[in-house]
Amino acid sequence: MAKATSKARRAVVLLSGGLDSSTCLAVARAEGLEAHCLSVDYGQRHKGELARARRIARALGAAGHRVVKVDLSAFGGSALTDAAIAVPKGRSEARMARDIPVTYVPARNTVMLSLALAHAEVIGAEQIFVGVNAIDYSGYPDCRPAFLRAFERLAKVATRAGVEGRPLRIRAPLLRLSKAGIVRLGTKLRVPYRLTLSCYDPIRGRACGRCDACRLRRKGFAEAGVQDPTQYAK
């Protein structure tokens, strides 16, 4: 893994503590970037991922890690922020691909990228890494290429760096990879997947094994031919 130096190019990495964002951090480090991780406490029910993010940032040699609180549970509208909405369990892949699920958090990635944009301007970062994926995923609108292109255009006109000719790049290196492809890439980059938590509804700190995130994660490890180190609830 590349080591950061005082002269290294800087990047902000949105780090949730899950499989995809951790792999993104490993990609940034492998490119020799000084990675400054940003996690968001947005009122999610599965707050355990924030503790995982801290451990992953240390394990992968991030230059810094900070957690910003923005309470999206004030609006609700998602099974991830509203305890009154059940997290879907046991859905088939066909059902997952059919519509946008109740685990979609309105404007979450827009808010997170905006926070990352502010952080990047302050520390002089050139790039923002985000672990969105348009394949083997639940069809969230803010994980699609059109959203990322639009946000990059916004960043160019909405920041001092952008208008002064130093636009920030939005990097989504996992966008076109299957979950198996992500697992293979992360394994090659020595991502400590045992530390990650993808589950939407953990049970006493262990993955439920039945939510969409768990099912896609399990499928990814199986198809990649890599042993799944996830601790699942019985």
Image (cartoon, helix red, strand yellow):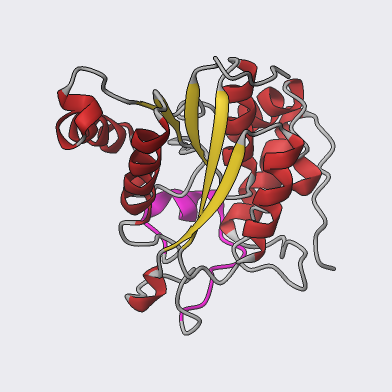
Q: Position of residue 98 (x, y in %)?
A: 39, 52
Residue 154 occupies which quadrant of the picture? top left
Q: Main secondary structure of the magenta part?
A: loop
Residue under the image location 79 percent in, 29 percent down? 225
Which quadrant: the N terminus? top right
Query: Please, is residue 221 above or below residue 196 in the view?
Result: above
Residue 171 in view: no
Residue 90 falls within the magenta-colored stretch: yes
Residue 24 vs 18, above or below: the answer is: above
Q: 103 or 75: nearer the eye?
A: 75
Left or right relative to 76: residue 60: right
The quarter of the image holding the C terminus is bottom right
State the image coordinates of residue 170 (x, y, percent, origin top left): 36, 28
Instruction: Report whether 141 appears left or right of 45.
Output: left
Q: Is residue 61 visible?
A: yes
Q: Residue drawn 20% across and 17% down?
A: 165
User: Height in image: 111 above or below 5?
Assistant: below
**Residue at horizontal 57 percent and vertical 40 percent from the top:** 21
Q: Which contiguous range is marked in magenta?
A: 85-101
Which residue is the extreme one toward the bottom? 84
Residue 233 location, x and y as percent?
81, 66
Count how many numbered circles sit on residues in the image. Answer: 0
Residue 101 drawn at (x, y percent): 41, 61
Q: Which residue is more in the foreground, 67 or 90?
A: 67
Q: Is 130 situated left or right of 65 in this image?
A: left
Using the image, determine if residue 114 lies above or below residue 76: above
